[in-house]
Image (cartoon, rainbow, N blue to C red):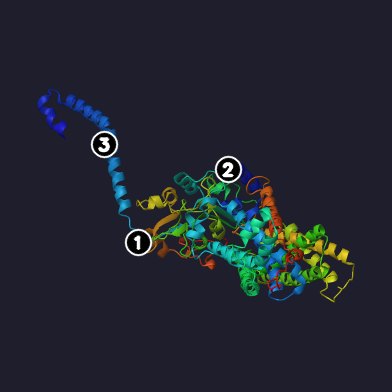
Amino acid sequence: MNTEQSAPPDAPEPVADASLDRREFLAKCLAASPLVLTVIGVARSEAQNEKEKSYNPQEHYYGMGVDVSKCIGCGRCAEACKTENNVPREPFYFRTWVERYVITPQGETMVSSPNGGIEGFPSPVSEKGILRTFFVPKLCNHCANPPCVQVCPVGATFITQDGVVLVDKDYCIGCRYCIQACPYGARFLHPETGTAEKCTFCYHRVVQGKAPACVEVCPTGARIFGEVGARSSPLNRFMRFNEIQVLKPNLNTEPKVYYARLDGEVR
Amino acid sequence: MQEATGQFYSVLQQVTGYIYPNEAELQWGLLIVLYPYLTGLVAGAFILASLEKVFSVKEVEPTYRLALLTALAFLIVAPLPLLLHLGHPERSFEIFLTPNLRSAMAMFGFVYAWYLMVVLLLELWFDYRKDLVLWARQERGLYRWIHLVLTLGVTDLSERAVAFDGKAVRVITIVGIPSAFLLHGYVGFIFGSVKANPWWSSVLIPVVFLFSAIVSGIALVLILYLVASLVRQTLDMACLDKMASFLFYALVVDFSLEILDFLHRLYEAEESVKILAELISTRLFLSLVVLQALLGTVLPLVCLALVSPVFGSRGLVPIPAELRRLLYLGTAVLIQIGIFCTRWNVVIGGQLFSKSLRGLTVYKMQLLGLEGFFMSALLLLAPLALLYLFVKILPPWKESVVPLPLRQEGSGD
């Protein structure tokens, strides 16, 4: 605005001058951009810190919805999880993974999850023919009645007020009882810290108002994260418009990962 | 870590069906097999000791103190495999300081401390006190001081004091029986209460653990008594026969419970029955069917039924005492192998199938390292070394009790 206003009285060739000024302006902008970006960055992180500081766990209660019919088995969720949470890269440690189910016309069910589905799934899908096939993302169910929390001898694993099951790695003694108690195979012992590990719903992101990494990267929106109770939340909407099932309901763990269109073969 | 992950890759090669990705690593290995095995021996040895004190089975008296010392030696070693197995052993004390009261495992510290302090040490002290005083009086040098210190300064040998010792021992034994049940029932509960695992989750598991513990404890003391008698050139055959009879009774109960558990699972045929059947017929065939059931239970049962004086005072097949001793020894060793396999089949077996109930994995035992074979062998030998030391300091034999009858012998022993 300033440059345009000052240009006409001083310059005999307004068009040329204006273009020069615009160039100058752009150059200056470019020169100033690191500073501006830094300021913006600081402001944003300040805002995030503020968000984190003002975060009140009592105001939230989280869960996750999984629309099985939307999962294409790309494994980006498992990949993003490993990156976001520094999960060991070896194919024995997963906070989340994707399973492929193939049910043959003979009624045989074949399940696989090569490297958690991170590199996708091999084809051909089945040599015995396919009755139906689908992918199922798995993760910690953040049970409302979690057996892992019950068995931890020192209380190192616990439920937060906002309904997330976490492990305090500075307190865990590494007895692995929680891993045994989890019916879903969602836990493992971190080979370096020697403590139990699991999905945290990306708690560090959630308290900043962001979605978990797996939800963020899912290209088909198969994972829906949010408030279980708030009627306006996407998760609540998902739960209103779909018939919901949870994994192994007979064990009374009261999972908070809600599946839509889940096949009876899934365990 | 490199070594471990390399091992998991080879595990993946041998997986049949589907296991959850996190299940490639078997969480509880050989060390955790040792834990219920060792505590079982403790509980069993104690129950044997209590036969004499509470149920007045006079024949087994020569093994009373040996059984108590055995229980103590094994109890001291029992928590070591647990400790070595922890990811953070240095934080283990948190179990005592900030236990999660809803956790079965958190009770370990209290159950263990109760059993060690209130039951075993106290009973041993009351039982040995009179002898400690007498030994200290007639000895010189190191032993004198050790025995003197062990009296804790209570050197009163009056009739009343000695009678009190005897009464105390009886009361502690009576408290000790439920405590021994608690100790090993609790270990069974650790496994039996894991609802995620259909192989473990059973109310019968603590009871089965208990009776297999009694079996293993009696068999162990029988072996130790026989070995000691070889060294000492003296043996009470009536005692040995009685022990063999009790071994038989305990084995019958134990086997019945195991069969009940098996039939119950088979008849209910829950969701898990297919994968468990596959588990038994493939991965656990040797350790469960052959070693635990046939060699570790059925064969000893038959042997004891024929030879020991359970049916008729001379047994169904009367054979000379020397041969009988040999058979008892062989039977007891077989039983030990069988019970070790029982623990193995529970702990390792329970982790060889996926919780998805769709596949089986394998356990690769290491030779070296904390979780390795040699470490476990060491932990199995450690209580025997401790026991040797205890026997040196506190001779459990009858001859060493009598030496100095100052006044009247009390009812203390």
Q: Are marks 1 and 3 on the same chain?
A: yes
SS category of the residue bearing label 1: helix
Relative image position of residue A79 (x, y in whole percent): 49, 45
Residue type of the residue flagged with mark 3:
Val
- Horizontal and vertical percent position of residue B348: 65, 57
Viewer-nearest of labels 3 and 2?
2
- Residue B336: where, in percent of width, then height? 74, 60
Q: CA distance from mark 3 to mark 2?
A: 45 Å
Position of residue B131 measured from the top left corner of the image (x, y, whole percent):
68, 65
Q: What mark, if any, has residue B1 been given in the picture?
A: 2
Crowdedness of circle 3 by 10 Å Cα count: few (<14), some, many (20+)?
few
Q: Earlier in the sequence, mark 1 or mark 3?
A: 3
Which chain contains the residue that carries disc 2? B
Q: Is residue A3 above or below residue A247?
A: above
Q: Which mark is residue A36?
A: 3
Q: Under tag 2, what secondary structure?
A: loop
Cα–Cα gap, marks 1 and 2: 40 Å
Position of B44 compared to B195: left or right? right
**Residue B345 picture quarter:** bottom right
Pointer 1 and pointer 3: residues touching (CB < 8 Å)? no
Q: Chain of mark 3?
A: A
The residue that disc 1 covers is A58
CA separation in Å, label 1 and label 3: 36 Å
Q: Which mark is residue B261?
A: none
